[in-house]
Image (cartoon, rainbow, N blue to C red):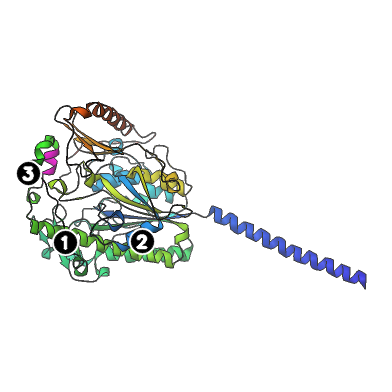
């Protein structure tokens, strides 16, 4: 009997041991799978959005959803585009190359006219096992003219492409414009009819949500680019977003009548090129600014819907979320409206990143980064290889150590000029520089960049140092991309 019981005990022990071993192996397999599970990317980009957001401390603009994302991720306060115009900026973001490397300086070119064999950011993910999809504006569009079309898209970059068209495209005859009949290249606005989902950006959000559901169901790793068309002109949104802003509460920037006399002539030419926008009466300026704030809040609501879907589908813990803009925007600062200048208003952009495993959620990073750095950063975060020619610098380490630095300066250009932004200064040079062709701003004393110190003797040595640094940055940004065919054309003044 005892022998029988011993044999039974041994048999049961062996059985339970096998189960224990199976459980341990299963757990190990799950852990290994988790370690190798691909991180998704939700890449959200707005059009013509500056840092007039609640998360960036704006006194009036209401952006509860972007603000919430900032509390969940890391907010970057010193992010700069490399060319403050839609086409060239987006080209740099999505190729990881500077405009001087590709020759992409204007709105009307497709990126592969310049670099036919380039592997773009979404294409790099696609080549390494991801579904790559875009909804709305990622590469350049003529906005609003190209809404509902592929625009200047790069079809090679995506497995799936969607370009919604909302009622805002059909309301153009009702839009007020400073230049009648023009909408995208001048100040124009309309407090419109319809629900959010009737408008183009509302449809962008709905399509993005459908794709998230599909990728969740298929358990497919994805790079999803969601490009909102707002707040780009015309400022069209449902009327409830205009109702958020009392025009009497809006501050109109003031500029001294002699201000232009302190600037180099090329800078004056840039600031005065849109004649219909010069010296706007306060009443008209407040209407325009109200429109800009309204479409920001409208766009924010659509961002919120996409992020809510990401959460409800249980995808947040395995998705890198990026929110940014292609460049900044003036709304009366320096006496100017819109973009394509070499001031902070034009080249500084919002950037918020929320990535699995981050240790600094809800904090702020003041280190300087450039939009060109997104390509290597996202590739590193996802554990992907990337082309050797990518020129950006990864700032992955800043996500966990935001007090560190990856750059000492940013470089931005427009036809005819370059600007260098350091922690304390902005140094701008037009043409070959020299007397009357440079600007220097001490941002510690003058954060609005209204006092040009270029002729101040006490800054002479500093100007020489910054000029040398600018030269080095320009040289680096023009190094031919290794192994990549480049077809350059003469720079064209983009005009709008």
Give the overall secondary structure of the magenta segment.
helix
Can you tell which mark lies on residue 257?
3
Q: Nearer the viewer, mark 2 or mark 3?
A: 3
Q: Nearer the viewer, mark 2 or mark 1?
A: 1
* Residue 151 seen anywhere in this rendered image of the structure: yes
Which comes before the other along the chain, label 2 or label 3? 2
Disc 3 is placed on an element classified as: loop
Could you tell me which residue is drawn at 7 percent across and 50 percent down?
279
Q: Is residue 104 above or below residue 144?
A: above
Residue 424 pos. (x, y %) = 28, 38
The span from disc 3 to disc 1 (Cα, nearest Å) is: 24 Å
Q: Is residue 320 above or below residue 256?
A: below
Quadrant where the N terminus is found in the figure: bottom right
Q: Residues within 10 Å of mark 1 (few under 14, many from 20)?
A: few
Q: Are marks 2 and 3 in contact (CB under 8 Å)?
A: no
Q: Which residue is mark 2?
A: 68
Residues 169 and 264: in front is 264
Q: Is residue 260 left or right of residue 104?
A: left
* Residue 489 seen anywhere in this rendered image of the structure: no
Quarter-of-image position of residue 224? bottom left
Can you tell which mark lies on residue 249?
1
**Magenta residues?**
267-273
The span from disc 2 to disc 1 (Cα, nearest Å) is: 24 Å
Residues 154 and 222: in front is 222
Is residue 232 highlighted in magenta?
Answer: no
Residue 154 pos. (x, y %) = 32, 50
Which comes before the other along the chain, label 2 or label 1? 2
């Amino acid at each position: 009997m005892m022998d029988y019981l011993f044999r039974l005990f041994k048999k049961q022990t062996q059985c339970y041991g096998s189960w224990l071993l199976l459980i341990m192996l299963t757990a190990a397999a799950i852990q290994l799978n988790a370690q190798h599970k691909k991180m998704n990317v939700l890449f959200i980009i707005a059009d013509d959005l500056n840092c007039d957001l609640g998360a960036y401390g704006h006194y009036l603009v209401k952006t509860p959803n972007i603000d919430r994302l900032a509390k969940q991720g890391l907010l970057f306060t010193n992010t700069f585009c490399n060319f403050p115009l839609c086409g060239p900026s987006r080209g740099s973001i999505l190729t990881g190359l500077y405009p001087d490397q590709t020759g992409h300086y204007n709105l009307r070119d497709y990126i592969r006219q310049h670099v036919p064999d380039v592997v773009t950011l979404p294409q790099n993910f696609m080549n390494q096992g991801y579904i790559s999809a875009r909804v709305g504006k990622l590469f350049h569009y003529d906005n609003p003219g190209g809404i509902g079309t592929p625009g200047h898209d790069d079809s090679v970059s995506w497995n799936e492409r969607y370009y919604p068209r909302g009622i805002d495209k059909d309301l153009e005859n009702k839009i007020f414009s400073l230049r009648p009949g023009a909408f995208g290249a001048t100040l124009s606005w309309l407090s419109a009819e319809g629900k959010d989902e009737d408008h183009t950006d509302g449809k962008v959000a709905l399509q993005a949500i459908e794709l998230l559901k599909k990728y969740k169901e298929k358990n497919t790793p994805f790079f999803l680019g969601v490009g909102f068309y707002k707040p780009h002109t015309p400022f069209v949104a449902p009327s409830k977003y205009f109702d958020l802003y009392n025009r009497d509460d809006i501050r109109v920037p003031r500029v001294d009548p002699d201000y232009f006399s302190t600037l180099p002539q090329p800078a004056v030419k840039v600031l005065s090129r849109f004649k219909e926008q010069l010296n706007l009466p306060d009443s008209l300026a407040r209407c325009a600014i109200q429109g800009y704030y309204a479409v920001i809040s409208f766009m924010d609501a659509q961002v919120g819907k996409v992020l809510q879907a990401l959460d409800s589908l249980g995808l947040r813990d395995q998705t890198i979320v990026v929110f940014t803009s292609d460049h900044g925007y003036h709304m009366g600062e320096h006496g100017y409206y819109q973009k394509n200048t070499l001031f902070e208003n034009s080249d500084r952009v919002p950037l918020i990143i929320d990535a699995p495993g981050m240790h600094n959620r809800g904090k702020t990073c003041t280190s300087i980064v450039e939009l060109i750095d997104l390509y290597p950063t996202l590739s590193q975060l996802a554990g992907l290889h990337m082309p050797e020619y990518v020129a950006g610098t990864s700032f992955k380490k800043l996500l966990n150590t935001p007090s560190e630095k990856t750059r000492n300066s940013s470089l931005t250009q427009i036809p005819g000029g370059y600007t260098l932004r350091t922690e304390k200064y902005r140094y701008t040079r037009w043409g070959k520089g020299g007397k009357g062709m440079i600007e220097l701003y001490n941002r510690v004393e003058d954060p609005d960049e209204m006092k040009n110190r270029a002729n101040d003797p006490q800054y002479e040595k500093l100007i020489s140092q910054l000029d040398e640094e600018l030269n080095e940055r320009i040289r680096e940004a023009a190094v031919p991309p290794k192994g990549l065919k480049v077809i350059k054309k003469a720079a064209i003044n983009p005009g709008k």
